[in-house]
Amino acid sequence: DAGVIQSPRHEVTEMGQEVTLRCKPISGHNSLFWYRQTMMRGLELLIYFNNNVPIDDSGMPEDRFSAKMPNASFSTLKIQPSEPRDSAVYFCASRPLAGEGTDTQYFGPGTRLTVL
Amino acid sequence: GNSVTQMEGPVTLSEEAFLTINCTYTATGYPSLFWYVQYPGEGLQLLLKATKADDKGSNKGFEATYRKETTSFHLEKGSVQVSDSAVYFCALTPFTDKLIFGTGTRLQVFP
């Protein structure tokens, strides 16, 4: 089975540009999480969805960040406009809401974002 | 509230040494406990988990026992290898959708 797929793996952009990160969860997983990892702040939960519905976006830093999940197999995290302090590794994770393993999140390889 | 406290790293060991990474937690109720591992340049992978008191999770020679009386879930391995060099995260899920992570402990193993 394919794991969580994220694209791009690396993104370098200039301040002020729009950035879109993409995630495809594991097939059959109907809960999806977006995390950000930095040296200073560690691993932070930004937002998560259950059945494509945003449940908790309290971790989203500010209005420049937005996330969508238009269907069960795709989610995006958008930053507009981007700033240098947004530089981080962004992870997507998924888990099933029923059956075995509902308490275990499976992480993608991450997108390393650098904003110049 | 719910929180996880891990020992500060880095932990530096020689190959075949014994490893302990301490993890303690604060939680309401009886959470599930996890150890995740992050190898360089990769995402987090589940290493092991335990869902109730006195359970022992184990995988790849690593073990951790859910100790309710000491609110701990220490990670141990009897003989580490260079390939175990990574960052290890202790985490809990207190019967909500979220995972609460510790700050991570970097392990460096030298030949």
Image (cartoon, rainbow, N blue to C red):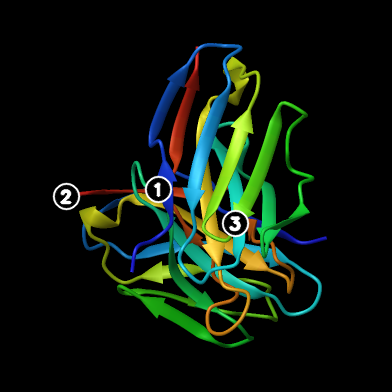
* Foreground: disc 1 or disc 3: 3
Judging from the image, mark 3 belongs to the subunit labelled: A
Secondary structure beneath label 2: loop
Q: Residue at x 35, y 50 (%)?
A: B39
**Residue B60, percent across and down?**
30, 73
Disc 1 to disc 3, C-alpha distance: 21 Å
**Residue B23, percent across and down?**
58, 62
Judging from the image, mark 2 belongs to the subunit labelled: B
Judging from the image, mark 1 belongs to the subunit labelled: A
* Foreground: disc 1 or disc 2: 1
The residue furthest front is A70
Q: Residue at x 35, y 41 (%)?
A: B41
At label 3, which amino acid type do we have? Asn
- Nearer to me, B55 or B100: B100
In the shown orientation, is residue B106 left or right of residue A73?
left
The residue furthest left is B111
Is residue B106 visible in this depiction of the protein? yes
Q: Which mark is residue A109?
A: 1
At label 2, which amino acid type do we have? Pro
Disc 2 to disc 3, C-alpha distance: 48 Å
Crowd rating for badge 3 (residues with CA inside 10 Å; few <14, some 14–19, many 20+): few
Instruction: Residue under label 3, please give it.
Output: A71
At label 1, which amino acid type do we have? Pro
Is residue B102 visible in this depiction of the protein? no
Instruction: Residue under label 2, please give it.
Output: B111
- Nearer to me, A1 or B18: A1
